């Protein structure tokens, strides 16, 4: 083939490609304006993906609320209890955020639908700018004796509902993770102050150093009244600094001028627990009203003076990325030890091929001796990478929310599983469960929630 023939062939094919691309472009423009195929189908897919609706495009179906199914069953898979108490579970049920009271056979006795847009109906009321209520989840919840539900929309606000689901009050703020009673009245939760170092360069050196993070996320302790008024808010990093723990707060050694240092979220607090008067005698280092706090970023648990807010005690590890410290009657603090690093969480999903190393660990604050009290024996295997919770029961047992498994376990004082529930969503997924607790029927002063609702 001559050079001129090669040139002619190249020009022909080049013209054909350009013509094809031009035609496609022109059709695309016309299709967009005239709503011709495939534009309507593509727009529908985009809308459903954006709103988090039930469409399995690019693996997006309810993705924010689902985890891999581990084949552990569906509903109540173990029931060795002999009481008629109810189990409170808060998580992703019936394709929505939901709190429910469940009978021991799995029957739902009462449910609250938790819709962020319903509870914050006006756009200007919403702390979080989201297109769908499914882009928000819940974390931290409790039910009162009157059957009222208090809970956090994670990093988006706190709501109190009556037993029929009507809003009693709502706080639009950066509240998150934890919801516990304050013995003096009201509730403890966690908040967050987000600030720009370039706008507040003197707020908190070295984190406010020019050129550090774009924004700093500074977690706070927040006390809320029964009526939803914020009574107190205290910066956790500040109280650490004022207690002489700045060295611990900055122990990663990263450059604070490095915009990719990963230290924008300073501590990632995830649970606050108050030492009640009834247990105070078991703790020689502490007093009633002292506060235990877990901070995932630092593998740190510490106890604050309930009055001065000074750090009385702290320890890093042996737990890893832990949650939920609880004061126990035996003078120890038990901790939900995730015991796995964040790289086990890939694209918002747990890598279930990894060893199941999550456990519940107890520490004696006086001696620093630790003991794994659940998670080491056969039949106790757990794996929860990013969340998890346990509540102590009057018989020295525990109820455990294994978040990543969509599973709730009740164990007795010997560590034997006596009740187990799996929140199966479909063959491949479970719905996440964020909180759980056992409530005897006698707990409710006005009858079971829902009995007086129309």
Image (cartoon, rainbow, N blue to C red):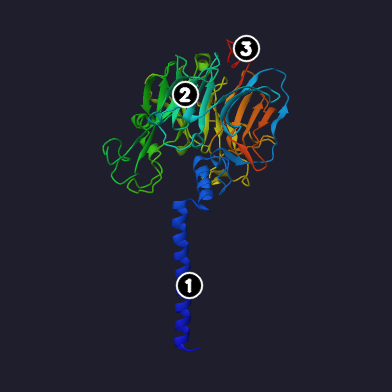
Q: Is residue 103 visible to us here?
A: yes
- Residue 445 found in image quarter: top right
Q: Is residue 132 above or below residue 303?
A: below
Q: Secondary structure at mark 2?
A: strand
In three-dimensional space, the C-alpha distance between marks 2 and 3, rounded to whole angstroms, equals 25 Å
Q: Is residue 305 visible to us here?
A: no
Q: Secondary structure at mark 3?
A: helix
- Tell me which numbered mark, 3 or 1, is placed earlier along the sequence: 1
Q: Which numbered disc, 3 or 1, marks the residue closer to the eye?
A: 1
Q: Which numbered disc, 1 or 2, marks the residue closer to the eye?
A: 1
Q: Is residue 20 left or right of residue 451?
A: left
Position in image of residue 136 (x %, y %): 49, 34
Q: Which numbered disc, 2 or 3, marks the residue closer to the eye?
A: 2
In this view, which residue lies farthest toward the bottom? 2
Q: Which numbered dot is residue 159?
A: 2
- Tell me which numbered mark, 1 or 2, is placed earlier along the sequence: 1
Decide: few, some or many residues near mark 3? Use Cα within 10 Å; few <14, some 14-19, many ≥20: few
Where does label 1 land, which residue?
16
In this view, which residue lies farthest toward the front? 34
Residue at 44%, 87% in the rendered image: 4
In three-dimensional space, the C-alpha distance between marks 1 and 2, rounded to whole angstroms, equals 62 Å
- The total number of labels drawn is 3
Position in image of residue 21 (x %, y %): 46, 65
Q: Is residue 230 left or right of residue 278?
A: left
Q: Is residue 240 above or below residue 257?
A: above
Cβ–Cβ under 8 Å for marks 2 and 3: no
Where does label 3 land, which residue?
442
Decide: few, some or many residues near mark 1? Use Cα within 10 Å; few <14, some 14-19, many ≥20: few
Front residue of 379 and 121: 121
In this view, which residue lies farthest toward the top? 445
- Tell me which numbered mark, 2 or 3, is placed earlier along the sequence: 2
Q: Secondary structure at mark 1?
A: helix
């Amino acid at each position: 083939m001559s050079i001129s023939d090669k040139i002619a062939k190249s020009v022909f094919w080049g013209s054909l490609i350009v013509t094809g691309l031009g035609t496609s472009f022109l059709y695309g423009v016309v299709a967009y304006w005239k709503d011709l195929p495939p534009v309507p189908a593509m727009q529908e897919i985009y809308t459903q993906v954006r709103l988090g609706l039930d469409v399995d495009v690019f693996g997006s179906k309810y993705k924010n609320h689902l985890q891999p199914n581990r084949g552990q069953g569906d509903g109540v898979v173990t029931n060795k209890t002999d009481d008629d108490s109810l189990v409170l579970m808060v998580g992703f049920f019936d394709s929505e955020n939901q709190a429910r009271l469940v009978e021991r056979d799995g029957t739902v006795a009462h449910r609250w639908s938790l819709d962020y847009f319903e509870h914050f109906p006006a756009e200007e009321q919403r702390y979080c700018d989201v297109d769908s209520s499914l882009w928000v989840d819940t974390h931290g919840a409790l039910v009162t004796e009157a059957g009222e539900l208090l809970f956090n929309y994670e990093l988006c606000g706190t709501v109190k509902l009556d037993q029929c689901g009507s809003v009693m009050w709502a706080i639009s703020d950066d509240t998150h993770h934890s919801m516990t009673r304050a013995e003096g009245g009201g509730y403890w939760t966690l908040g967050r102050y987000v600030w720009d170092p370039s706008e507040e360069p003197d707020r908190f050196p070295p984190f406010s150093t020019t050129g550090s993070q774009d924004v700093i996320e500074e977690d706070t302790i927040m006390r809320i009244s029964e009526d939803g008024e914020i009574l107190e808010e205290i910066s956790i990093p500040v109280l650490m600094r004022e207690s002489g723990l700045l060295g611990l707060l900055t122990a990663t050694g990263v450059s604070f001028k490095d915009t990719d240092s990963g230290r924008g979220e300073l501590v990632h607090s995830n649970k606050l627990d108050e030492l009640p008067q009834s247990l105070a005698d078991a703790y020689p280092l502490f007093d009633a009203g002292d506060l235990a706090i877990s901070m995932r970023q630092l593998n740190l648990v510490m106890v604050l003076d309930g009055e001065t807010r000074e750090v009385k005690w702290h320890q890093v590890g042996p737990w890893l990325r832990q949650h939920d410290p609880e004061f126990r009657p035996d003078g120890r603090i038990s901790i939900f030890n995730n015991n796995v690093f964040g790289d086990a969480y890939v694209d918002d999903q747990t890598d279930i091929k990894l060893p199941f190393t999550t456990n519940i660990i107890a520490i004696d604050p006086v001696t620093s001796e630790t003991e794994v009290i659940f998670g080491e024996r056969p039949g106790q295997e757990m794996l929860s990478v990013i969340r998890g919770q346990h509540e102590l029961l009057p018989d020295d047992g525990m109820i455990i929310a294994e978040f990543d498994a969509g599973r709730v376990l009740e164990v007795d004082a010997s560590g034997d599983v006596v009740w187990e529930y799996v929140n199966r969503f479909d063959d491949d997924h479970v719905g996440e469960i964020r909180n759980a607790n056992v409530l005897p029927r006698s707990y409710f002063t006005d009858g079971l929630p829902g009995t007086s609702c129309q």
